[in-house]
Amino acid sequence: MLISRLTGRGGGLAVSGLIAEVIAPDIYQHVGSTLKPDLVFVTGTNGKTSTTNLISEILAAKGAKVVSNHSGANIARGISGAYISSLFGSAFGGGARAGVFEVDEAVVPQLATAMRPSVQVFLNLSRDQLDRYGEIDRILDNWVKSITKARPGEEQALVVNADDPRLFPLVEGGNQSEVDVITFGLEEQPSFWKDFDYATDREFCVCGTIVEYRERFSGHLGDWFCSSCGRHRTRPDVTGRILESSQAGTTVEVSVRPVSEMRVFYVPQLGEYPAYNLLAAAAAAFKLDINLDVVEGSVNQAKAKFGRQEQFHYDDKVIRIWLAKNPRGLDEIFKALIVKEAKRQHLLFVLNSDVQDGKDVSWIYDANFESLRGRYRSLAVSGFRASDLSLRATVAGLENIETCDDIGGAMRASLDAMDGGEYLEIIASYTAMLEIRSIVAKLTDTAPFWK
Ligand SMILES: [Zn+2]
């Protein structure tokens, strides 16, 4: 900023970006070597922030001073923060330091080459945002190319989601380069989610054939195999079995097979993704020589963030906010709402159509609203596109739909319909969520902004 002001040209971002590029290679290498051996990268389309938080908590529980780029702050700022903190750490004696960084899919290869993390976690690769550039293949290619054999005395491991067939080239590439690969995945689909029906894309094997599934877990994740070339999911080293899903959270049995450790975890979030994040963190912890006792103590420390099942308490009622951006994401939410108390839940959908929400709302027809039949006590719709939602819900055969254009009014009506101890699940598009969040913050006397 200062330099751009001095040069009088504005565009501070471009100038600081340029400076970063000039000095970055040294900074990255220095920070990398300062933080090792406990230096972890987390990447993938979904769950980066949550998994980064979780692994940070785990390393902190072990007693390390953890440097991280929380809340999606940009990677350069996270790294420079790490750099500064490493300077102070050594000046004051410090103690063990560790770094856990959420790294954007596109910059993983460059950053990994410079910093050489001990553990790289690959969560999943979804088409959601990447599709528009048709970039998935290129990203994966670059990931695989960046895998190099560990130098003498260097720890290096890849933690890979075995259930994602798109990530399989990492398992093969790691094995070819003699890099330690540890995989994680679910054991099976729990019985209560088995019948959930959602639109799924065809998925292709490296050989070009359509991948088949013995069982699908979530979207393109599952126990997959290719009948043409014989490639198949490797049996995960760290496995999870979802035992129960209740409004308050998910019970997951985690097994670390190489050391025959097993533990039942309670995760205060719903759906499959939190379970995957937990498995990824447990696998990373295993590679960092941290046992499941430490992992267990850390799980409850990791709090939900912006639009990711954020919870508020109003009297003795619970309000939970979900962000819906596309049919796949909305289906994940619907599935997560299949909990044992489903008949008692209250649902409020809020849909706007600003640029950030997407002008075209017809995508709501691709999501499985039908799955909500018999799974709520009250159902309200609101936002600029309340009438579209109402029609969609009616087409899905849902009954007793309350339509209220005013979001505040809709929320009051929903809360009035609730008994103590019940949950209001608010599912909102982006700008609707901002509105909802500020109304809820006022109502519950919570900080109006969140990090
Ligand atoms: Zn194949």
Image (spheres, rainbow, N blue to C red):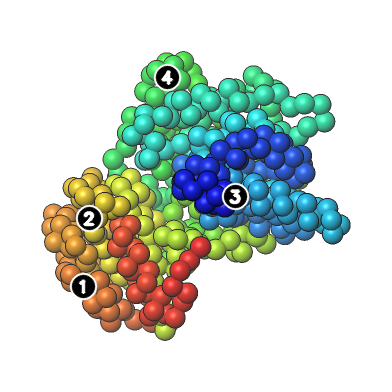
Q: Earlier in the sequence, mark 2 or mark 4?
A: 4
Which badge, 1 or 3, comes first in the chain's sequence?
3
> Is residue 32 visible in this depiction of the protein?
no
Q: Residues within 10 Å of mark 1 (few under 14, many from 20)?
A: some
Q: Which residue is mark 2?
A: 353
Residue type at mark 3 is Arg
Query: Vertical placement of 122 versus 384: above or below?
Result: above
Compute the Cα span from label 3 to label 4: 46 Å
Q: Which residue is mark 1?
A: 406
SS at mark 3 in the image: helix
In the image, residue 184 lies at what x, y percent?
Answer: 58, 40
* Residue at the disc numbered 4: 227
Question: Are the residues flagged by discs 1 and 3 in contact, CB closer than 8 Å?
Answer: no
Tell me if label 2 and label 1 are in contact, CB under 8 Å: no
From the top left corner, tell me how far across and down residue 315 is, in percent: 42, 84
Q: Which residue is mark 3?
A: 77
